Amino acid sequence: MVSLLAGPIPSNTGRVKARSLRITEATQGRLRRLNLYTAMPPIVLAAVVVVAVDMRTWWHALVLAPGAIAALVAFERWTANDIGRVAWPCLIVAAAVWPVGALTLGTPNAYWGVISVASLALPRLPRHRYAAAVALLVFVAGIGATRFLVDDGDVLGPYVLVPSVLTAGVMVLSFAGERFYDIVQELEVSREREAELAVIRERVRFASDLHDIQGHTLHVVKLKAALARKLVPTDPARAEQELCEIHDLVGDTIQQTKELVYAQRRLNLSAELENAKNLFEAAGIRVRITRESEADARVSEMLGQVLRETTTNILRHAQATQVRITLAREGITIVNDGAASNGPLELRGLSALRQRIVTDGGELTVKAEAGEFTTSAAYGGAR
């Protein structure tokens, strides 16, 4: 009877994605097959025992058997997640056996079929399921009580109390089992959604890295191209040098993009510091770099991304004349003047980096004060 205490995973949890449904259905199939293979033999044995115990003569079996058969059919359909199609016919047949058995045959166990079918069907009702369970209890107890009309002997215990207590217990366990299967489904759906979120997070990370590479490079190319155009009439040699640097920069960006696609990209913090210094100086911005210590290898790549994104933001959005960069073992701080008083405090690229840094156990802060804009990333003790 244990496997009758839970229903298959319901399909009314709303719309989920196709992959979630496939995984959930596979889990349902495994659970249903497990119930069928492990519970059907004892249920068949219980049905035979109930009929044999209550049978006084051969024709009693003809009256009691339909209730047992209805329970077996309902259980088989329940394991196939198709209880709804046979619930009412089986319930009507099993319910009819109980009054006939109690009033005509004097068989106190004829209620077995109706509570077996009900334990499978009622928890699957879309509404009024608890009211239906109460109605079932009243029906079982009421039919048992009518035995007083034809028998003055011991009726209360075997016909009223025992069936009522067993019916109540089975229904409570059935609803609890249904809730258990709901939780199994929710866990499966949650696991699949977590996998989908992981894919989305990876896509966001990829988009952020691609923005770091190409957004930064395109802006630098724009600056260098503008400088080269100005230098062509007055200093052709310097203009040619700038064009060569643009060519090298584009080639390097193509290589970095390929490495990103194949998950091989690694930022070099020292190279990023030198690159930032050159860019600021080319834009006429004074830069001072202070190395308090070498960055920890564990966080140097992320600090390099913060430096690259901040450098791009300064060149794009600030009217800076000087920049101070301070590098520590587990942190970096970039301070620039010329911050716009009405500009955004945190740009989209930094916002995406903040999420990644927090996930890695660090902290990224930005603040604007007295015309200066400070970007600081720190891990561990550097905070």
Image: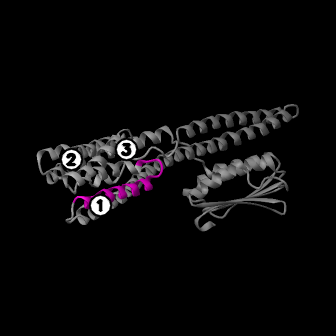
Disc 1 target residue: 145
In this rendered view, identify the residue nearer to me: 101 or 323: 101
Cα separation, mark 2 vs mark 3, equals 33 Å
Q: Is residue 141 magenta?
A: yes
Q: Position of residue 329 (x, y in %)?
A: 60, 63
| Amino acid identity at mark 1 | Ala
Few, some or many residues within 10 Å of mark 3 (<14, 14–19, 20+): many
| Tag shown at residue 28 | 3
In this rendered view, identify the residue nearer to me: 272 or 338: 338
Q: Nearer the viewer, mark 2 or mark 3?
A: 2
Q: Is residue 57 magenta?
A: no
Residue found 20% across the figure and 49% down from its top: 47
Q: Is residue 382 left or right of residue 10?
A: right
Asked if disc 1 and disc 3 are in contact, CB closer than 8 Å, the reply is no
Q: Secondary structure at mark 2?
A: helix
Cα separation, mark 2 vs mark 1, equals 19 Å
Residue found 82% across the figure and 55% down from its top: 339
Residue found 70% across the figure and 41% down from its top: 215
Few, some or many residues within 10 Å of mark 2 (<14, 14–19, 20+): many
Disc 2 target residue: 64
In this rendered view, identify the residue nearer to me: 122 or 54: 54
Q: Quadrant of the N terminus?
A: bottom left
| Amino acid identity at mark 3 | Gln
The answer to which of marks 2 and 3 sits earlier in the sequence is 3
In this rendered view, identify the residue nearer to me: 221 or 120: 120
Q: Secondary structure at mark 1?
A: helix
Q: Position of residue 265 (x, y in %)?
A: 56, 43
The answer to which of marks 1 and 3 sits earlier in the sequence is 3
Residue 273 visible in the current orientation: no
Q: Is residue 235 left or right of residue 148?
A: right
Give the magenta range.
Answer: 124-150
